Image: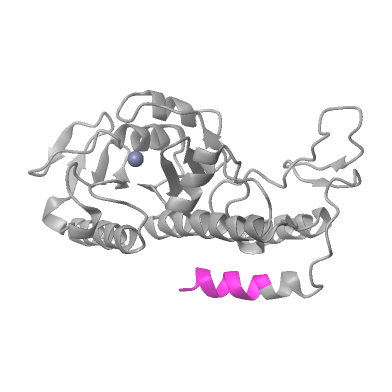
Amino acid sequence: MQKSAYEIKKEICEVGHKLYDKGFVAANDGNISVKVSDNEFYCTPTGVSKGALTPDMIIRIDANGNKLEGKLNPSSEIKMHLRVYRDRPDVNAVVHAHPPVATAFTVAGVELDQYILPEAVLTIGNVPTCEYGTPSTMEIPDSLAPYIENHDAFLLKNHGALTVGHNLTKAIFTMEEVEFNAVICKHARELGNVEEIPCEQLEKLMDLRKRMQIPGRHPGCKKCKNLGTENCRCKHNAGGSHTCTCGNHAAPAASADLVAEITKRVMAELNK
Ligand SMILES: [Zn+2]
């Protein structure tokens, strides 16, 4: 059943409150949008804390960012949302925030590309860092271009993160997953070592993702460091995954019950 305008506005507010409560945004940072048709979108206004959003503040705009309804004005960062909708017809919701740990990775110049948590592997894969751009200009939407086809989560260099989904719940869950993955990765680095999930286990997760028909895009199994060179001896499969035989992914084997356990957890998550 199609949601009413009020329901969509209320849902956007709830996501805004969540972003604020989690410390993913400071002051008036961040923005959220939902697509209702090819030329109609609801989005958050500029100049309002996401923690103080009420449904009457939500604006309706067209695909060029012109306001169709609402007393406040849309955020200047809405350009990057519109770029995503233009290039990804499967996307119906976009969330932009400044989750502190994931953002710190971009400030430190550290890629968030290690496959360390099965759930993050299943849902997002590696998160690319888009080139730095001046907020409110076309530089940020343009910086997404190289990654937009194969990713649902993006880091914006020295700025924040952007996540997309076929619905708003998926977009906010992906934002939470990006930050959680970054937090665990940071802790592991502080403990002195990061052991990635071995390639054969990644392959199983990729198979599982296909079987579960998880919606959205995924970059596939991370490519080995020697990919494309004559030193690469990995077996490369359709869809970007590969079976590692190059020895670059030596790590202790994950539990044999891993896949069964993840299936259970992800199914529970999706049924929420
Ligand atoms: Zn921002």
Residue 181 on image: x %, y %: 57, 57
On screen, residue 72 versus residue 153, left or right, reads: left
- Judge whether residue 2 can be spotted in this image: no
In the rendered image, residue 191, in percent from the top left (x then y), is placed at: 67, 61
Which region shows up in magenta? Answer: 262-272
Residue 239 picture location, percent across and down: 72, 42
- Where is the C terminus found, in terms of image quarters? bottom left
User: Going 49% across and 56% down the picture, which residue do you hit?
Assistant: 179
Measuring from the top left, give residue 59's x and y in whole percent: 17, 45
Q: Residue at x 65, y 55 (%)?
A: 189
Magenta highlight on residue 270: yes
Residue drawn at 28 percent across, 32 percent down: 63
- Compared with 264, 1 (above or below) is above
Query: In this view of the protein, can residue 92 be seen by the observer?
Result: yes
Kindly report the secondary structure that dominates the magenta region of the rendered protein: helix
The answer to whether residue 121 is left or right of residue 245 is: left
Location of residue 53 by image quarter? bottom left
Q: Which residue reaches farthest left?
A: 71
The answer to which quarter of the image holds residue 267 is bottom right
Q: Nearer the viewer, residue 190 or 199?
A: 190
Judge from the rendering whether residue 27 lies leftward or rightward of residue 128; answer left or right.
left
- Of residues 1 and 123, the one drawn nearer to the viewer in this rendering: 123
Q: Quadrant of the N terminus?
A: bottom left
Compared to residue 147, the image places residue 50 above or below, namely below
Q: Which image quadrant shows ligand 1?
A: top left
- Whether 243 is among the magenta residues is no
